[in-house]
Image (tube, rainbow, N blue to C red):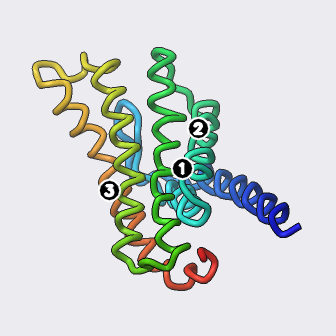
Amino acid sequence: MERKRSKVLMITEGGMMIALSVLLSYIKVYQAPYGGSVTAGSMIPLLLYAIRWGLVPGLTIGAIYGVLDFILKPYFFHPVQVLLDYPIAFGLLGLAGVVYHFYKNKKQSGYGILVLGVSLGIFGRLISHVLSGVVFFAEYAGDQNPWIYSIGYNASYLIPELIISLVVFMIIWKPLQKFIN
């Protein structure tokens, strides 16, 4: 019975985190000209979910959010670009779920491992967007190397998003730890 209750709780929390991420994604601090934005911490609920439930649930909820984000704010150039910029990119936020095992096994539970998890998730998203940029949007680079351009462009909004996420996590982490374990 406990296992069934836990799965229901996991699915319910996933839906709530997706909804919260969608709402936060509409509060934009900065909108990049060709897509991407700095928001009021829209990735935090997805990252928190991954940290709480683990890698596979985190990847799944992130990918579901990515599909929903495409439905709500579509930017379609090519089917592979859609995959890289939406379900894969947001799914990779679930990489923060590797932290779950450190907390579950009580091996380490400090801020350092939290920073690692959040950074890993956002770095995964960055890699996916960079690949999409190099393959599908290289013409925007002009004379510049498409890799350098894509890294710079995507980092211009994901690094501020990382900083916002880390600051918020540092503030809320201590009270939330009792729910993570």
The structure residue drawn at horizontal position 32% and vertical position 27%, both measured from the top left corner, is 133
- Rendering coords of residue 90 (x, y %): 50, 42
Label placed on residue 160: 3
The structure residue drawn at horizontal position 50% and vertical position 24%, both measured from the top left corner, is 82
* Label 1 crowd bin: few (<14), some (14–19), many (20+), radius 10 Å: some
- Residues at discs 2 and 1 in contact (Cβ within 8 Å): yes
C-alpha gap between disc 2 and disc 3: 20 Å
**Residue type pointed to by label 2:** Asp
C-alpha gap between disc 3 and disc 1: 14 Å
- Rendering coords of residue 13 (x, y %): 71, 60
Label placed on residue 13: none
Residue 110 or 135: which is nearer the viewer? 110
Residue 137 or 100: which is nearer the viewer? 100
The earlier-in-sequence mark between 2 and 1 is 1
The earlier-in-sequence mark between 2 and 3 is 2
The structure residue drawn at horizontal position 38% and vertical position 49%, both measured from the top left corner, is 30
**Residue type pointed to by label 1:** Ser
Residue 54 or 47: which is nearer the viewer? 54
- Rendering coords of residue 160 (x, y %): 32, 56
Quarter of the N terminus within the rendering: bottom right
- Residues at discs 3 and 1 in contact (Cβ within 8 Å): no
